[in-house]
Image (cartoon, grey):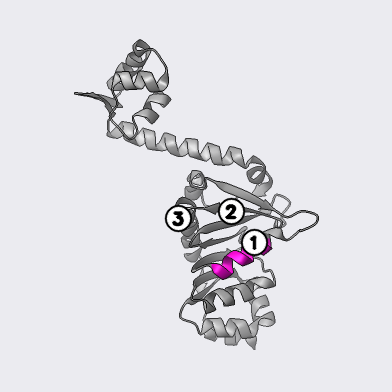
Amino acid sequence: MRTKLLLCLEDNEVSAGQLENVLKIRSSTILHSIKDMIDSGIVYKKSTGYALTNIGQIQALLLDRLINALKVLDEHKDFWLTHDMSGIPDDLLVKIGMLGDAQILKGDAIDLLKTQEFFVKELVSSKQIRGVSPIIVPEYPFAIAAAIKNGAKADLILTDKIIDIVVKEHSEILKELLNQENFNLYCIKEDVRLAFTVTDRLLSLGLYRKDGGYDITCDLNCIGEQPRLWGVKLFEYYVLKSRPFTRDDFDEHAQ
């Protein structure tokens, strides 16, 4: 009952009659719970109804966050159960409810790399790209270069191993990108246990499987402002663990 009342009063002052209509519960039951919440400092009475105190507002916000998190975890239970989530810091795990309206994109026996094809198309058409990756797919450097050419701003964090591969296999593309003002590359030395990209419209998140291998066939894709903000915070977390990779670093690697 307290949960229902917290959610009903979260945004508005509500009268006893309105609460009865919304909750479909007798007013005597509602008023009994309201009295307990008033005594606990969660609700206070106003001239036209009831409202949450400051403490009540905080409890309602936390409850709302919890409910959203449970929805996200339940909707894609298999994804969260079968993958390694250690790459997501605790303060963002508790905000997992921001990833609402997500879709799981999976490859199949006919089109194993469906997720990567979708991702490459998204990159090329994006205007803002932030990404962290411990893996590389051959099409990625070309997609990033095409997006930069189209005016996108890109900030990428790659592991040492991936930077070595890019320097060796895509040296001309990387050299050209490092000369662009709208491209920043960072290097991270630690073992990164996820890959993700945040664009101006999409968060695409890939995780390692529990057996230790990266799951290239399955991505969680979320469209909307809340997932984008969550992804930006995750990117900022990894920026603090990284260092800029400059043209001098490129020359040193290329020797």
Quarter assignment of residue 250: bottom right
Q: Verify whether residue 171 appears in magenta.
A: no
Which x, y percent locates residue 113? 73, 61
Can you identify the residue that label 3 sits on? 229
Decide: marks 1, 3 in contact (CB < 8 A)? no
Q: Residue at x 58, y 57 (%)?
A: 204
**Disc 1 or 2, which lies upstream in sequence?**
1
Q: Residue at x 43, y 34 (%)?
A: 63
Q: Residue at x 66, y 42 (%)?
A: 81
Instruction: Report the predominant secondary structure element of the magenta stretch.
Output: helix
Please determine whether, in this image, residue 241 is positioned above or below residue 47.
below
Please determine whether, in this image, residue 78 is positioned above or below residue 250.
above
Which x, y percent locates residue 193? 62, 58
Decide: marks 1, 2 in contact (CB < 8 A)? yes
> Which dot marks residue 118?
1
State how many labels appear. Answer: 3
Tell me which amino acid carries mark 2: Asn
Can you identify the residue that label 2 sits on? 221
How far apart marks 3 and 2 lie (CA) works out to 14 Å
Secondary structure type for disc 3? helix
